[in-house]
Amino acid sequence: MSSFSSHFLVLVVLVLTTMISSLEVEAQTCKPSGKIKGIKPPSGECKKGFNSECCKPGELYTTYKCSPSDRKAVLTTNSLEKGGDGGGPSECDNHSDDTPVVALSTGWYDNGNRCLHKIIINGNGRSVVAKVVDECDSTMGCDGDHDYQPPCPHNIVDASPAVWKALGVSRENWGSLDITWSDA
């Protein structure tokens, strides 16, 4: 094989490798889909349990219709029982905060297709199986249906206290934990 052919073959392989890597990175990307402008919640309408945040008037909040395909997530804490701090009642099931249940960001929730499915959460050196009972809405927020809280980021697994306990995280450290998750 000539030197030119060898160099050409190496160049083709490099170009193809770069294109494939670019496609893999693009598959992992979840780009914002818009913005929501925060409004002032009516008095007493935004519950602040488990470090919940209320929308701030005039602040712009990013929205997402997708979630990352690699399922690297941030575990947050929420009361998912009726009357809890998560806005309206859970979409899929009634339960107490003593049950390992979660709400998934919009893309992962998949229009309710994961309702009542179980997932395995890995974090803090442990694993727990939890049931999906709600959506952590990444497309809407700052309104009464969402307890006047901002839209969820695109990579959230919002968990009941039972999940945090099962992962062995002490109460004073609940709030934000890097995790991975998979379907059970």
Image (tube, rainbow, N blue to C red):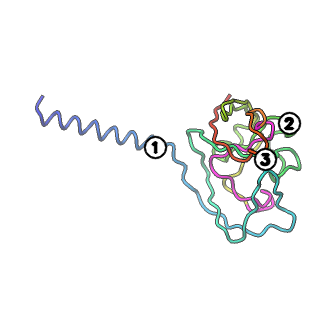
Q: Secondary structure at mark 1?
A: helix
Residue 81 x, y percent position in the rendering: 86, 44
Q: Is residue 45 above or below residue 161?
A: below
Q: Is residue 60 above or below residue 126?
A: below
Q: Secondary structure at mark 3?
A: loop
- Say which residue appears at 29% left-offset and 39% top-offset: 14
Q: Residues within 10 Å of mark 1 (few under 14, many from 20)?
A: few
Q: Is residue 8 above or below residue 49?
A: above
Asked if disc 2 and disc 3 are in contact, CB closer than 8 Å, the reply is: no
Residue 25, label in figure: 1
- The three-letter code of the residue at mark 2 reads Asp
| Distance Cα–Cα, label 2 vs label 1 | 38 Å
| Distance Cα–Cα, label 3 vs label 1 | 31 Å
Residues rendered magenta in the picture: 142-164
Q: Which of disc 1 and disc 2 is earlier in sequence?
A: 1
Q: Secondary structure at mark 2?
A: loop
Residue 11 x, y percent position in the rendering: 24, 39
- The three-letter code of the residue at mark 3 reads Asn
